[in-house]
Image (cartoon, helix red, strand yellow):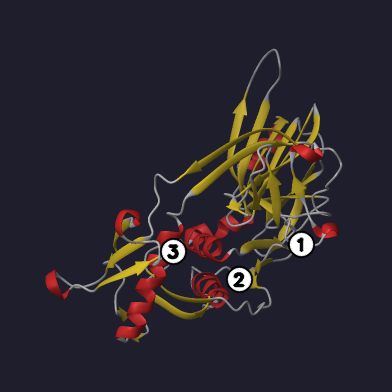
Amino acid sequence: MILYVWEFDGEKYKKAAVIDDATSVIWVRRFQTAGEFEIYIRATKELLLLFMQEELLITRHDIPEIAMIPEKTELTTDTENGDYLIISGRSAESILGRRVIRGYTTYSGTAEGCIRYLVGRNLITMANSNPRVIRLLELAKEHNYPEKIDKQVTGKNLLETVSNICIAYQYGFKVSFTGEKFIFDLYKGVDRSLHQSENQRVIFSPEFENIGNTSYIYDRSTYYNCATIAGEGEGSDRKVYTMFQDREHAKGLFLHEKWIDARNISSNTDDGELTPEQYRDIMYQQAQEDLEQCKPTIEFSGEILDTGMYQFGKDYGLGDTVSIVNQYGISGTVIVTEITEVEDETGYKLTPTFSDWRLD
């Protein structure tokens, strides 16, 4: 794997080194948050000095738009085996984690518009003299995704907030590197599950001998289907709302209630006073996001076998929905949430990671 190291000269990035002899490279891409990497390479004084600098980037020759940001440099010395550097860090998406969302930020509209508004307001659409602005970062063209959201955020980390919205609406996001600037963009995966035509399907199953030993866990221990969310106010004047995830089923023995303290959601925002209806919608949105994290979970793990049946990047990609069928006939759809690539002295290996199952 050929890697390029980019150094920021105060105005732009320029190539400072080429690494083509790393002992091992681990390269992780993720659908809805920042990825990470680790490089294990023989140490030289030049490389050590280079990686002690700030604001470096590492890219690959085959996928130059994906940039990793070194965050940690380790030097180990060994008289028998030689001296090595271990360089690790996260992908360019981690830039969002350098900002918190200030004030009471309220948004009502599309989920895509909300994410773009939060990223723009906290990283881009400010005067160049503002220390919060990243002038090398731009927003990609809007996709006009239709999903709606009512959201209020204050004091939250931008990366965590964007990631949570993307998880709720099944979006992915990326920060691509062009060689001159960064581009923030949202995207959706492609449905390649059993529900699609035969030539579009991607199925991992013992029947096709493309999956090895598996483990399956169905867990309802943290399941809730009703949320009581309490906002601003004191005592009997406190604003309290109730939201059901499944009203027909959520009653009697089968009602699972959760209390959510949302006192930080205020009707008095930076953009003015919210109407009671606007405040209610924001509270419902927060309750919905909390309940989404409290659904029954299905944990599945299994070794994906490289049989040549499916090729990543051609037959399926990061964020795509694929099907899994285990040896007991349990089938479900999963999202490819992560791709881990490892290249070392034993060769190259690509391993996908999947989301929780949604049973068919």
Q: Is residue 140 visible?
A: yes
In the picture, which quadrant includes the C terminus?
bottom right
Q: Nearer the viewer, residue 276 or 142?
A: 276
Residue count near mark 1 (Cα–Cα under 10 Å), binned few <14, some 14–19, many ≥20: few
Helix, strand or loop at label 3? It is helix
Look at mark 3 in the image and give the residue it sits on.
289
Q: Is residue 184 visible?
A: no
Residue shown at the point (29%, 79%) measured from the top left:
267
* Residue type, mark 1 in image: Gln
The spot of residue 236 in percent (x, y) is 13, 72
Q: Does the CB distance between marks 1 and 2 fall below 8 Å?
A: no
The spot of residue 59 in percent (x, y) is 74, 51
The spot of residue 38 in percent (x, y) is 66, 38
In the picture, which quadrant includes the N terminus?
top right
Q: Nearer the viewer, residue 39 or 234?
A: 234
Q: Nearer the viewer, residue 82 or 189?
A: 189
Look at mark 2 in the image and give the residue it sits on.
135
Look at the picture and state if 278 lies above or below 305: below
Look at mark 1 in the image and give the residue it sits on.
196
Residue placed furthest toward the left: 235
